[in-house]
Image (cartoon, rainbow, N blue to C red):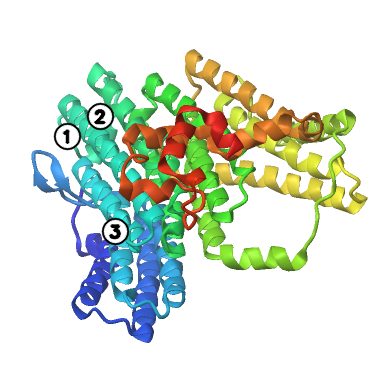
Amino acid sequence: MQTTLLTFVPLLAPFLLLGYAGLLAMRRSSESEVLKVSGESIGLIGIVIALICATRVFINGPFQSTLLGINELGFSIRLDALSVSMLVMIAILGFVILRFSANYLDGEKRKSVFFSRLAVTIASVELLILSGNLFQIFFFWVITSVCLHSLLVFYRKRPQAVAAARKKFIVARLGDISLLLAIYFIYRSLGTGNLSTIFEIVQSESFVMDGWLNWATALLVITAALKSAQFPTHGWLIEVVETPTPVSALLHAGLLNAGPFLMVRMSFLMIESSTASMMLIIIGGLTAMIASVVYMTQASIKIALGYSSVAHMGFSLMICGFGVYTAAILHVVAHSFYKAHAFLSSGSAVDVVRSKKFTLPKRKGSILRLMLSISLALGMYFLFCNIWGIHPEQNFNLMAIGLIIVMGLAQMLAATIDTKGSGKAIVLTIGMALIVSTSFFTLEHGARVLLGSEIPELQQPVMIVQWAIASLLVCYAFIIGLQLLAPRLMSAGIGYRLGVHMRNGFYANVIFDRMIGSLKNEKFKWANLTVEEEKSPDTSIETIEKMVQQPELLVNH
């Protein structure tokens, strides 16, 4: 550990944002040009600082500052490949969101209030990823949640946004308790909260995983699941569509990633616990499977993007359970930029789709064509496994992720091969599938080289984890098979009936609402109605409560 003037360089970015927020709070000015110029300038400075930190780590390697605290608990800065990668990502996203917000909120009377809250939230996320101590992680874990809550309730007269924020507040506090207990168990077992010391102890040959640490890893999984809106506590994320679009972009592209980031940051400890791996595979895998299916049935673009984020976070946590932490962090970074762009351009995307008015070719449901699509996807998969030297007995977990990619490629290929599409479209689709396959294996290898010693080496999972992975792959294959046979199922009528239940998220959110009493609280009342403006008997609170008790009524409704 060391402390130099350069140690405090990464702190300049969050401190500038905090200073910007303080000035806005004191001035309470809504001058658009001042907000735009100052916000963009601070965002650009943040990107430069993040790049300087990345360069320093590349040249001199990772380092951690001297602890400011007592009894091995307190505040310290840790710069390594993982933290600077996330810092660069957050800095870029922060700049884009700040710039977008200046135009998005043009004419808003409380614009300065929004910008101050947004700046504090971005700063707290940056301080979280720079944490070098468990106490600091917990402190900024809570702060980011509180700051997000202030953004979610920015429009207090929008009942659905307020209701979703309150549901999120309940889930977040449960996550905070879980994280606090996990830190207590780690500190009780290892006697330190310093990340460098913890990693050294865990990697030593004399290390033994005791009961306290097993409980700690399980609680860390629960913390990550609650933070990243995993099934069945995902409902609040779907209902925050009434918040300002920049908040949605920051939430989905930044704050949700805290769950997978925590798993990767504590990966040296997590990989020692087969219980934690099993929990990640079950929670993340089932969430990814359910949310991705529900996502395809949504008509609202923001709700669809919400389910997409739930699925992506589940996939990231599942990969952590596989033990392939490089692929997890790669997926987090890719998802962040994709989802920020998706939300910030959601309005114009609707206009583009409406202007084109195109229709997709109708699927035939031909078994022969579907088998051809699957064969092509498998051929690409085995080709790249052979090129990169990936073998089942050595890299079972990496091959499992590759098989999931294959299932997605098979679906993509079937979309053109199983239609009356032109030969050109089929060739283009095959080319895209090759690019996807090449990108995954190449970027995963690149991420492994980049992160280096900051994550555990890829190792073969224990037998029970291998069985869990295999079982999950069978479930995924079954779902993909149903999707490939969708034309036949729709013609039989079962597809339509199943689609109604999927569009309602299998009623998990409604059941969760009932558990926390949101349907009985007048402040939550209109948040659960499909049509807020029409207070007809069909949308009364009594009717909704009956729907919770008898889900078939909701289908008819």
Q: Extreme front residue here?
A: 537
Name the residue tied to disc 1. Answer: 192
Residue 208 sits in quarter: top left
Mark 2 neighbour density, 10 Å: few (under 14) some (14–19) many (20 or more): some
Residue 357 sits in quarter: bottom right
Q: Which disc, if any, is residue 201?
A: 2
Camera-side residue of 107 and 291: 107
Left/right of residue 298 with respect to residue 416 in the rendered view: left
Q: Which disc, if any, is residue 165?
A: none
Under tag 1, what secondary structure?
loop
Q: Are marks 2 and 1 in contact (CB under 8 Å)?
A: yes
Residue type, label 3: Ser
Q: Nearer the viewer, mark 2 or mark 1?
A: 1
Q: Could you tell me which residue is drawn at 23 percent across and 62 percent down?
A: 8
| Earlier residue among tags 1 and 3 | 3
Residue 392 image point, x, y percent: 62, 22
Q: Could you tell me which residue is drawn at 42 percent across and 79 percent down?
A: 106
Q: Are marks 2 and 3 in contact (CB under 8 Å)?
A: no
Residue 287 image point, x, y percent: 51, 33
Left/right of residue 309 with respect to residue 296 in the rendered view: left
User: Relative to residue 343, is residue 72 depicted above or below?
Assistant: above
Name the residue tied to disc 3. Answer: 150
Q: CA distance from mark 2 to mark 3?
A: 39 Å
Residue 203 image point, x, y percent: 32, 28
Quarter of the picture containing the C terminus is top right
Q: CA distance from mark 1 to mark 3?
A: 33 Å
Residue type, label 2: Ile
Camera-side residue of 105 and 450: 105
